[in-house]
Amino acid sequence: MFKQIYIPFLLLLSLSLFAQKKELKSVDKLIQNEDYSSALEQLLAAQSIVEGSELKYQAQYQFLAGKIYSEQKQFGAAFEALASAKQLETENGSFKHTAEIDMLVNKVSNDAINQAVEENQNENYTVAADLLVMVYNVDKEQNTDYLYFAASSAVNGGDFDRALTYYQELKDMNYTGSVEKFYATKSDTGEEIELSAETYVLFQKQKDYTNFRTEMTESKLPEIVKNIALIYVQQKRNDLAISAIKEAREANPLDVGLILTEANLYIQLGDKEKFGDLMKEAIEKDPNNHILYFNLGVITAEQGDRPKARSYYESAIELDPTYAASYLNLAALILDEEPEIVEKMNALGNSRADNIKYEQLQEEREALFLGAVPVLEKLNEVDPTNIEALTTLKNIFGTIGDAAKFKMMKAKLEELGQ
């Protein structure tokens, strides 16, 4: 009697399991044939059959969904399905697809990152930020860099509230983005190359490389705090801006970058005295840092103090004569006066007095060019492939009528494919 009751039930259960296996197997075959649209359509049609079934079938369903969505570049749906598949396998105590799920998550993450790069290039900053945050949420501990990049995308897109949220989260976790880099020098050529951590260890056992060294990349924390502060300034929340920097400085009292960030904030607030005090503090903490003087030159130039900016760039060059950016910025600073001279020249009339004044301004302009030439020539020695330096020199020699040097610069540019 009891058997007659349970036999139909067992039969129905058996048929149900058979249907689940059949449907999922059919979907898998369509995926293998790369017919993802049909696979998704058939998978969704089988949803009612799989729901409430054994965990292993639910896990397989989500795994197949993750495969399809990943190929269709539906990143959010792919991450969600794969996370669900892994969770179901864990609950079931069966890890049939776990390794493949992990590989697929990595693939989807890389695809999403590449898509974000493309969206940024196309100025679709909101889409890029969405993708990068998606990758960050997959593994917040390992993928913190992508929250930082998402914040940058949000800034570029003008979404400062969103950027502030991300930067604040990064600051709260004391994110620096600093990583260890590995270098070695080729014994035969003297060329220094960057290595992976594994290769660095391996090459130390060989005689082909010498001068092994490591260094940590610069911390991104000062930039993060700076951006938080600047967003607060943009939002007219100056007290919060000052507070953010002071908090960061208390946690990192030796970080000269944070001193510069605070100084830059005060100059934006119009407090030149506080700006000057902070600049002195930065120099006292690190008087031989050419990058510090370079940054001081940048900030001071932005505020329109050309003589002071020039002295900072010259100090940077004195401390490190091989740092090309110092020469480039110094030359740009010198030539920055040219538009003012040209404007005055164009405003003159045709009277005798105006003609005399025109000649004086012409001499001033030429003197300006000649003042920039030694800086640019030194830059060319330090960095012979610097297109901007060669182009500027060519233009200067063309303007002042030095045909020989004009041809020389033109030839160098042609050698570089310009």
Image (cartoon, rainbow, N blue to C red):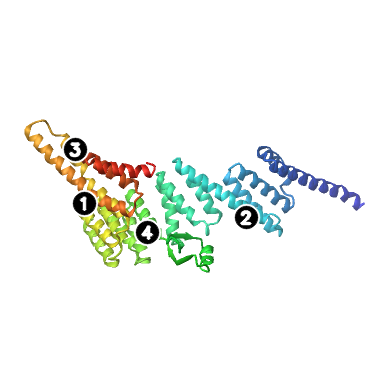
Residue 298 shows up from this direction? no
- Which numbered tag is attached to residue 209? none
Q: Which one is nearer the viewer's eye here, 173 or 292?
A: 292
- Left or right of 99 on screen, residue 246: left
Q: How far separated are the C-alphas under marks 4 and 3?
A: 39 Å
| Mark 1: secondary structure | helix
Q: How far separated are the C-alphas under marks 2 and 1?
A: 56 Å
Q: Mark 4 points at which residue?
A: 222
| Mark 3: secondary structure | helix
288, above or below 326, in the image: below
- Which numbered tag is attached to residue 343? 3
Point out residue 92 in the picture as x, y percentages from the top left corner. Answer: 71, 57
The residue under the point 57% across, 46% down is 76
Q: Which one is nearer the viewer's eye here, 9 or 58?
A: 58
- Which numbered tag is attached to residue 102? 2
- Left or right of 363 on screen, residue 153: right
Point out residue 306 in the picture as x, y percentages from the top left corner. Answer: 21, 51
Amino acid type at image mark 3: Glu
Residue that lies at the very extreme toward the right in this rendered image = 1
Upstream in sequence: badge 2 or badge 1 = 2
Q: Name the residue under label 1.
A: 306
Viewer-nearest of labels 2 and 1? 1
Viewer-nearest of labels 4 and 3? 3
Upstream in sequence: badge 4 or badge 3 = 4
Amino acid type at image mark 1: Arg
Q: Which one is nearer the viewer's eye here, 53 or 195?
A: 195
Within 10 Å of the Cα at label 2, are there few (<14), some (14-19), or many (20+) other Cα atoms? some
Identify the image quadrant of the C terminus.
top left
Amino acid type at image mark 4: Pro
